[in-house]
């Protein structure tokens, strides 16, 4: 069944999480922005479900790893929703399934020993309205999908296995420079042509309902995507081998990711990509990924500007980042803007982690990025720089939109081994501005920092390789 928005939906989405959703600016919050972070933690609450239970095996599901259980799981979800909500239970076993579509007031709960193993047959993922690399379209359903639902959850101690591999899904990427073998060889079909067509459609303002892809286009589905949803909880489960992005909430409000163990080293296996979200808590999660661990987004180029919905009011705490391109990242699909992102008490450590804190933008994206506050961040090892601000990402200066990145405060960051402290490269006429480093130390530094088109960088009690520095030209190895 094709799920797509009405024209009214397309016009109203900007109002779901618009600027009016910002928290009140009190004098106290203005003096200490971390009061806003505390407000996010207090305000975001997990959905509560009625005490009803719907075991998928009662509806005919078999955990033998062979039987396709898509219909049985859908029946359990539909029955649960029709009854007014509750818990759809996945018991211990290996349950093969196609796309799972959640409905309002439904909690999908996986017991310990339970695996939802998602089919590698693209035919098991019907066409739906979705967003792919920041652009709206009609494409394969994400493996777990919800559209305009309220009060939904995925919880438990079980595993969701997307079965991404060099044999399935990953080769659709085409050429890729990742650390894992992904299966593509010269002459094999891949996403490149369709990706370019989709992006041009967005630039030309082709109506979303006419951007129909799917079979023959090789645009991989995301793993978990709540779209336009309110009150979302994803907690406790293990998420493995995604075809594409792992957890991708779009235009959602009031979202919690808690205690997740996300691992997949395939192409674009981002851990989570909050896109145009408002009020989100990410805590106690482990990310071990083939791309950015966390990447805050808000739409690509013309599509991001058309919707114009920023990501805002996001709190990240007590998370562990292992392999990935960036640990805590903003961008690059960021044309709708981002603001008020907080991160604290996180540990980032891997020789295959490029950057600990990363911002990506360019002159085709544009967008206003401001008010980022990070503290008590422990960096064991990163392969490149501890902190990166990059306006040259992908197309760089080849555009007519001005990227803005300002007001970044990083306190008490400790890096044991970082090749560089800071790699900040704005554009002529579009500098990165107002970076403050306070009470930070960077050891194992072997290369000087790079600062181009970057203004107003303030250092307070910063040490590099054990020695105090007061000036930017001292951000280099001694």
Image (cartoon, rainbow, N blue to C red):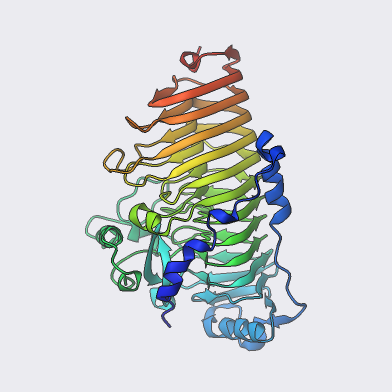
Q: Quadrant of residue 213?
A: bottom left
Residue at 44%, 20% (x, y): give it: 447
Of all residues shown, which one is farthest toward the left?
187
Q: Which of the two residues, 128 or 160, is positioned nearer the viewer here?
A: 128
Q: Quadrant of the N terminus?
A: bottom left
Residue 368 in picture, x, y percent from top left: 45, 43
Left or right of 399? Residue 312 is: right
Of all residues shown, which one is farthest toward the right?
51
Q: Which of the two residues, 69 or 449, is positioned nearer the viewer here?
A: 449
Residue 123 in picture, x, y percent from top left: 39, 78
Q: Determine whether 158 is above or below 21 in the image.
A: below
Q: Determine whether 377 is above or below 19 in the image.
A: above
Left or right of 215? Residue 382 is: right
Q: Quadrant of residue 189?
A: bottom left
Residue at 56%, 39% (x, y): give it: 372
Residue 12 in picture, x, y percent from top left: 47, 67
Q: Which of the two residues, 186 or 88, is positioned nearer the viewer here?
A: 88
Task: Count every numbered label the image shows and give the total.
Answer: 0
Residue at 40%, 50% (x, y): give it: 335
Q: Is residue 324 visible?
A: no
Residue 214 in picture, x, y percent from top left: 34, 72
Q: Is residue 287 visible?
A: yes
Left or right of 452? Residue 443 is: right
Q: Which of the two residues, 115 or 44, is positioned nearer the viewer here?
A: 44
């Amino acid at each position: 069944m094709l799920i797509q928005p009405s024209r009214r939906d397309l016009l109203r989405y900007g109002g779901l999480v618009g600027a009016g959703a910002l928290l009140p600016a009190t004098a106290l919050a203005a003096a200490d922005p971390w009061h806003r972070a505390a407000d996010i933690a207090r305000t975001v609450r997990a959905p509560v479900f009625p005490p009803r239970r719907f075991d998928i095996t009662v509806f005919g599901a078999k955990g033998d790893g062979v039987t396709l259980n898509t219909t049985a799981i859908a029946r359990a979800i539909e029955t649960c929703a029709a009854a007014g909500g509750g818990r759809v239970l996945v018991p211990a076993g290996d349950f093969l399934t196609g796309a799972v579509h959640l409905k309002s007031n439904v909690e999908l709960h996986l017991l310990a020993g339970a695996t939802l193993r998602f089919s590698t047959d693209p035919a098991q993922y019907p066409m739906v309205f979705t967003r792919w690399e920041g652009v709206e379209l009609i494409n394969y359903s994400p493996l777990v999908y919800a559209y305009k639902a309220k009060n939904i959850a995925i919880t438990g101690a079980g595993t969701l296995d997307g079965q991404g591999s060099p044999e399935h899904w990953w080769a659709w990427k085409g050429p890729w420079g990742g650390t894992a073998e992904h299966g593509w060889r010269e002459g094999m079909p891949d996403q490149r042509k369709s990706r370019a067509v989709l992006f041009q459609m967005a630039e030309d303002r082709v109506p979303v309902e006419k951007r129909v892809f799917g079979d023959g286009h090789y645009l991989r589905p995301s793993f978990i995507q709540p779209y336009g949803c309110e009150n979302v909880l994803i907690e406790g489960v293990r998420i493995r081998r995604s075809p594409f992005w792992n957890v991708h909430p779009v235009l959602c409000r009031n979202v919690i990711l808690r205690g997740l163990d996300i691992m997949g080293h395939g192409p674009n296996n981002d851990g989570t990509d909050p896109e145009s979200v408002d009020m989100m808590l990410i805590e106690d999660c482990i990310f071990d990924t083939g791309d950015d661990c966390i990447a805050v987004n808000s739409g690509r180029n013309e599509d991001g500007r058309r919707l114009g919905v920023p990501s805002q009011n996001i709190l990240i705490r007590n998370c562990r980042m292992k392999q990935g391109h960036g640990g805590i990242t903003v961008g690059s699909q960021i044309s709708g803007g981002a603001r008020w992102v907080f991160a604290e008490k996180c540990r980032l450590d891997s020789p295959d982690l490029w950057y600990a804190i990363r911002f990506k933008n360019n002159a085709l994206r544009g967008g206003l990025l401001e008010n980022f506050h990070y503290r008590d961040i422990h960096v064991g090892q990163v392969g490149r720089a501890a902190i990166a601000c990059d306006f040259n990402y992908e197309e760089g200066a080849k555009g007519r939109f001005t990227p803005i990145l300002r007001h970044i405060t990083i306190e008490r960051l400790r890096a044991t081994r970082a090749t560089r402290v800071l790699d900040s490269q704005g554009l002529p006429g579009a500098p990165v501005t107002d970076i403050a480093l306070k009470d930070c130390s960077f050891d194992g530094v072997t290369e000087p920092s790079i600062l181009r088109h970057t203004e107003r960088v303030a250092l307070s009690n910063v040490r590099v390789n054990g020695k105090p520095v007061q000036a930017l030209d001292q951000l280099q190895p001694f």
